[in-house]
Amino acid sequence: MAITDEEVRTATVLGVRLDRDRVHAVAARYVRTRALVEIELDNGAYFSFPPALTQTLENATPDQLAEVQVVGGGTGLYFPKLDADLYVPALFEGVFGSRAWIAAQLGQKGGQARSPRKTTSARENGKLGGRPRKSSPPPAET
């Protein structure tokens, strides 16, 4: 199926509008001394984040993070040594991975949380014998 001239014109107009209405990354680097990925924006602002916050970069080494490229007209970051991409607008919105990965991270943090209420509840449960044992499933009929 061929693309029509009208479709090209429409896409071009949309692209120009997107370029005008959003902030672009113009440079990016890994700052070893602070262990942060830093993005320079076309409006003069900077945005930085710890790589461990992202699903794609959480286990990356400083050497793997050292090489980063701005791609997609300033909408993406590419880490060649990891063959990994990040979408810059999503980073601005706090989206650092898939929904499932983010939910798992939040659950892990919640499970590690300590509060007086949680401590009291754990002690009370301990006095009652702790967590109830899982009952074994009934034997299968033959």
Image: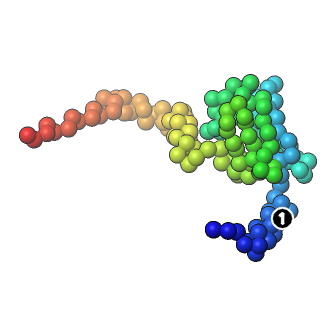
Q: Is residue 108 left or right of residue 1?
A: left
Q: Residue at x 63, y 68 (%)?
A: 1
x and y percent of residue 129 in the render?
Answer: 30, 29
x and y percent of residue 133 in the render?
Answer: 27, 32
Q: Residue at x 74, y 24 (%)?
A: 63
Task: State the count of labels.
Answer: 1
Q: Is residue 48 left or right of residue 133?
A: right
- Residue annotated with mark 1: 16
The image's colour scheme reads: rainbow
Q: Is residue 42 left or right of residue 121?
A: right
Residue 66 appears in the figure: yes
Q: Residue at x 77, y 50 (%)?
A: 72
Q: Secondary structure at mark 1?
A: helix
Q: Given the image, on which type of amino acid does mark 1 rest?
A: Val
Q: Quadrant of residue 83?
A: top right
Q: Is 81 situated above or below 98?
A: above
